[in-house]
Structure formats: structure tokens, C-alpha cells
Image (cartoon, rainbow, N blue to C red):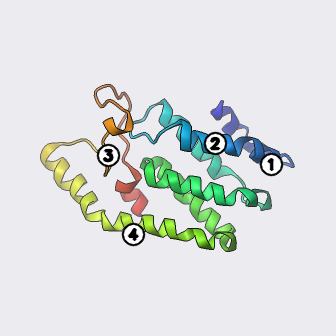
Amino acid sequence: MVMEVRDSLEIAHTAEYLNFLKCYFRAFSGILLQITKPQFVDNPEHKLRNIVVEILNRLPHSEVLRPFVQDLLKVAMQVLTTDNEENGLICIRIIFDLLRNFRPTLENEVQPFLDFVCKIYQNFKLTVSHFFENMAMTGEDVKPMDTSLSDQGINPATATGSQLNPSTRSFKIVT
């Protein structure tokens, strides 16, 4: 169903955009913040989260979006700081676009993003060590910085998808 919504997103370019946001924004937020959890393997739950983040990224930044901007920024920040790099990269685009288009409204909301950037750089040495030293010596799988797959409710032995880097350990996010 989410794929159908994504594929028919041209409604966001019509007079029905506000009604679309009123109906779907809370559902999208709920999917990302309550119903699903960040995933670090490519599985159906990751795909659902990824499609929802893609939809949020494709929303036009017109005045119709203004009442939802604060909440959209909070959702994007939550996903950026807890999710994998694929969803994190999309959230960075959402955040940059929101800050560019709604700067006066969001001036007080910049600090959490700057805190995240500082955390990434403070942990950069550990990230480099993790990828270049540990993996070269042990062939160890990539795991989130502060958590393991089992902490995310995923059994590494039964995970069927490919491994996804956490956004906090991503060279792409740093770039």
C-alpha cells in the first residue's frame, strides 16, 4: 500500500495536498517512530521504512507543508540518528531542504542536527578503526555503534538480507 501511495504522489501537486498531509502525515510518522524499528539488514521492514522516508522526501515544500514542518524535521532527525545509512542519507536531504525553505521557522531546531554532526566527527576515529582495522583482521560484520543486531530484535543467524551500516558509522553520511 505504501508503494502505491509513493507511486501516486502527484496528488501532492494538486489542491488536495493539504488533505493528503492531514490524512497521511500522522500515519507516516507512526510507521517510522512507533510501528517499525530501525533495521540494519535489508528486509521487508527496512523496505517499508525506506519507502515512507522517500515519500516524505518527495513532498513539495510549499506553504501547505508549513504546519507540518516542525514535526517533519523531528521525524527526519529521529530516523537520521537511529537508522541505517540508506534512510539517513534521505533524511539529510529532507533536513537540508526544510532548513533551506523554512529557515526562520526552524532556527531553534538546528541544534539537534549540529549535535548529531559533532557526534559523527567525535566518533570518526572509531568508525575508521571499525571498518579498516577490525574488518581487515577479523572479517567482523558491520554492527551499529552502540547496539548489536540482537538488541534491535534481529537474530543475526536468521537475518536474510544484506547488512546495512548504521547512519552513525557511515562515510556517506559524513560526506
Instruction: Mark 2 and mark 4 in contact? Answer it, CB < 8 Å.
Output: no
Residue at 69%, 68% in the rendered image: 102
Percent x, y of residue 16: 84, 46
Q: Are marks 2 and 3 in contact (CB under 8 Å)?
A: no
Instruction: Point out the tag, 3 or 4, that comes first from the N-terminus.
Output: 4
Q: How many angstroms separate mark 2 from mark 3 (CA)?
A: 25 Å
At x 14% / y 44%, what residue is drawn?
A: 138
Q: Which mark is residue 55?
A: none
Residue 127 horizontal/vertical position (percent): 28, 58
Q: What residue is pinned by disc 3?
A: 147
The mark lying in front, picked from 2 and 1, is: 2
Which disc is residue 118 wearing? 4
Q: Can you say which quadrant of the picture contains the N terminus? A: top right
Q: Amino acid at mark 2?
A: Phe
Q: Earlier in the sequence, mark 2 or mark 1?
A: 1
Q: Tag 4: Cα neighbours inside 10 Å, few (<14), some, or many (≥20)? A: few
Residue type at mark 4 is Cys
